[in-house]
Image (spheres, rainbow, N blue to C red):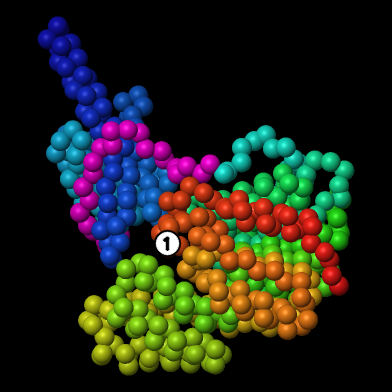
Amino acid sequence: MKHFTLLVFLFTGYFLFSQKSICGDWVGHLETQGSRLKIVFHITSQKNVLSGTMDSPDQGAYGLNMNSVTFTDPSVLFDLSVFGIKYQGSLVQQDSISGEFFQGEFTTTLNLKKSATSIASRPNRPQEPKTPFPYGVKEVKFTNETAGITLAGTLTMPKGKGPFPAVILITGSGAQNRDEEILNHKPFLVLSDYLTRNGVAVLRYDDRGVGQSGGKFDGATTSDFAYDAQAAYNFLSKTKKINKQRIGIIGHSEGAMVANMVAAADSTVKFIVLLAGPGIPIDQLMLKQTEVTSRFAGISEEEIAISLELNRKFYDILLNEQDDDRAREQIEQIVREHQNSMPVEISKQISDELPQLTRTMLSPWFRYFINFNPEHFLRQINCPVLAINGSKDCQVSAIENLDGIRKSVKETNNKNVYTYIMPDLNHLMQHCETGSVNEYIKIEETFSEEVMKIMTDWIKNFEIIR
C-alpha cells in the first residue's frame, strides 16, 4: 500500500511538473505570402486542467479561445477547431516547441519560444477612457423610417444646462460598431470622450446589422448608410439640451462621403468635418491606394503594374456596364487575355481569387462605391466644412483629396472651407513612421490629440455663414 501511495505521489508530481513546463506565453512567427505574422499562445492551468488562447497581433486578433490543450510530453496539441486552426508540435527544450500550424488547407512550420515574461493578451491603448465619466452617458435608439430599421447608439452629454453643440460620428468602410473598433483601437470612443469633456455632445451608433442595430449590413450601399445618418441627425435635432444651430456631422473615410451626402440633401446641417475623406473620384482613389499599399506590403513592381492594369479595366467595366452577367463575362475575358503573359504563379493566384473578386466587385456596395464622385455632393454643400488628412495616409492621400474637396466646395461660392494636412499622421489619425496599414495595430496612440483639439475648437468657434 505504501508502494502504491508513492507511485501516485510520483505520478502526480510528474503531472504537475509537465503542466508547469507547458504553461506560459509562447511566441512564434508564421511566414506566409511574403508576410511575417506574429503568433502568441497563452497556456494556463486551473485545477490541473490546461486551457489557452491565441493572439495574432499583426491581424488584430486577440483572445481566440482554444477548444482544448493537450500535452503528453513531448507532444503538444493546441486545438482551435472553432476557427479552423490547429497547432501540433513537440517540446524540444523547456522553452522551445517545434511544430506545424494548420488552418484549413494551409500548413506551415511554426516554431515557438517561451517568453521569459508575461505577454499582455491585448495591446496597450492608453487613450481609452475609463469610468466614471465626467459627463452623461445614455444608450439610445432611433429609427430610419425609409428602411424601416432601428439603430442603436450612445449619446454623451456634457454636464450643465446647455444647450451644447453636437455631432454625429459616421464610421468608415466595413461593418463597424459605434466605437469604429478596428485592430483593437476604438477611435470613436476616444474621440467622443474628448469632445464631450470639452463641451460637445456626441451621438455615435452601431452600423446597421452590427451590435444592437437592426437591419442587414450585407447588400447595403453608401446611399443606405446616408439614410441611417440622416435618421441620426433627425433624432439629435429633437434632443433636449442640444444647440440646434450647432449640430453637425463628423465622418471618417467612407463616413466622410456619407457626411457629404447628408449635408448636400439637408440644408439644416450646420457643419461637417471630413476625416481622411475622399475628394477625387473613387475609381482614381482606389488605383492610387492599390499602388501605395501594395508597395508598402513589399509586392514587386511587376505585380503592382499588373494589378493596376487589371483594376483600371475592371473599374471601367463597372462604370459603364450595368448588367451583372455581362460585366462578369467581361471581367473574366480580361483575366483570360492577360494570363498568357503573366508569370505562372501570378496567373494561378488570380485564377484562384477571381470568383471571390468578381463577387465583391459586383456587390451592390462596391458598384455604388466605385461609381461615387465626391464632387457631385461637395458642390451642393453650403455649410462650413473642415477637412483633415494625414500626410502619411496611404489609403486616402492628403494632397489630391484635400485639393479636390477645397476646389469642389468653393465652386458654389462656399468660402467657409478649411483644410489641414497633419504631419506624420496615417489614415486612422495616428502618429506613425511610414503610414503603412501594418503599423495601425502596433501604434499605442488611437487618435491624434492635435486633430481632436482642432475639431473641438472649430466646432465651438466657427462663424456660421448662410
Q: Quadrant of residue 376?
A: bottom right
Residue 104 pos. (x, y %): 30, 60
60 to the left or right of 118: right
Residue 200 pos. (x, y %): 76, 51
390 to the left or right of 26: right
- Is 124 magenta? The answer is yes
Q: Quadrant of the C terminus?
A: bottom right
Q: Quadrant of the N terminus?
A: top left
Residue 428 visible here: no
Q: Which residues are magenta?
A: 104-126
Residue 57 against residue 150 in the figure, above or below: above
Secondary structure type for disc 1: loop
Residue 35 pos. (x, y %): 30, 61
Residue 444 against residue 59 in the figure, above or below: above
- Residue at image location 23% in from the left, 82% down from the top: 343
- Is 46 magenta? The answer is no
Residue 155 against residue 32 in the figure, above or below: above
Residue 352 pos. (x, y %): 32, 76
Mark 1 lies on residue: 434
76 to the left or right of 417: left
Magenta stretch, main secondary structure, is loop
Which amino acid type is shown beneath numbered disc 1?
Answer: Thr
Farthest left residue?
3
